[in-house]
Image (tube, helix red, strand yellow):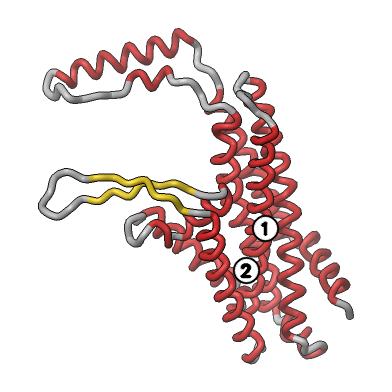
Amino acid sequence: MTVSRLIQGDLYRLRHRRLHRLLVILLLIGLTILAWQIFDATKPLPSSATTTAQARCLDAQAKVRLSDPSSNFNCEALALPVSTFPQSIASEIVSFAFLSLGFGLMVGASLTGHEATVGYIANWLTYDPKRFRFMATKGLAGALWSAIWTALGLLLFVGLSWSIHRAHDLLGTTDASVWSAVASMAVRSVALVAVVSALGAALGATLKYTGAVIAPFAAWVVIELLFPQLTVTRWLLIPNIRSWIEGGLQYQVVTCPANEHICSSQLMTLSLSHSAGYLGALIAIATILAVVIFVRRDVT
């Protein structure tokens, strides 16, 4: 049986399994929630509501300053203009990309993890013992399925964001350079989701359980979110994913010398090339290890 026929068979199973249908539905629900957040954030407040909120803020600030004269509630921020489409689209695409990465990892891991659990992989390899080809077809099928839905989701999401900003008169200067940047971010997002899905398929076949693939990644992300200073920012996973999608990232490094009460901050840059090498190395090492273990061990 040719590789293309095997991939077609896997795509057919992906299309008809309840779990993968549920994953697509969850992706669309997440997209809807993100779009609603954009709508809520760009919705203009009535001038009377802004004036009332500022008055209450200034009143509360005045009371606190009786005991602490340096207090500043930033009441003027209540009247700051809302970000336009060119100013906010990058962060919006990053949010959807992280959602899609979880979707892609689940698709790949569940594709092979389920088959390993029910014994399908062992039965298939008895019939056709070409393990490299088996792993390649599973990875390609998961990557293709995830890439298609991510691309469609991004197209819909960007369209919704543009429509919402247009309805609220917040398009700003949306010229060809903005759309070029959006297209570049979308392509990098889809590519990363596809690769992560292929990695999930490799790990699912090796670890035999979908949860065994998802848990370490989820734990890593939670640790980074809860303890962002555990290691250097340039070697964290989340900032490098953001840098890859956005085409580079700037972040602040705060240093507080010992026995001194004054801290200083420095603006650092995380380049696209660094993030590409970092993520590429992680994915390559994990994939190679998964494939080598899968090829050399007993899958029954």
CB atoms at circles 1 and 2 under 8 Å apart? Answer: no
Circle 2 is placed at which residue position? 200
Name the image quarter holding residue 54: top left
Identity, as a three-letter code, of the amino acid under mark 2: Gly
Q: Look at 55% across and 76% down and name the residue there.
A: 285
Q: Is residue 214 left or right of residue 260?
A: right
Give whichever of 59, 248 is nearer the camera: 248
Name the image quarter holding residue 128: bottom right
State the CA–CA distance, disc 1 to disc 2.
14 Å
Across and down, in percent, residue 260 comes to 12, 49
Circle 1 is placed at which residue position? 191
Give whichever of 197, 183 is nearer the camera: 183
Q: Mark 2: few, some, or many residues within 10 Å (few <14, many ≥20)?
A: many
Give whichever of 258, 94 is nearer the camera: 258
Across and down, in percent, residue 264 comes to 24, 45
Specify the quadrant that holds the N terminus: bottom right
Q: Is residue 64 left or right of residue 219?
A: left
Q: Secondary structure at mark 1?
A: helix
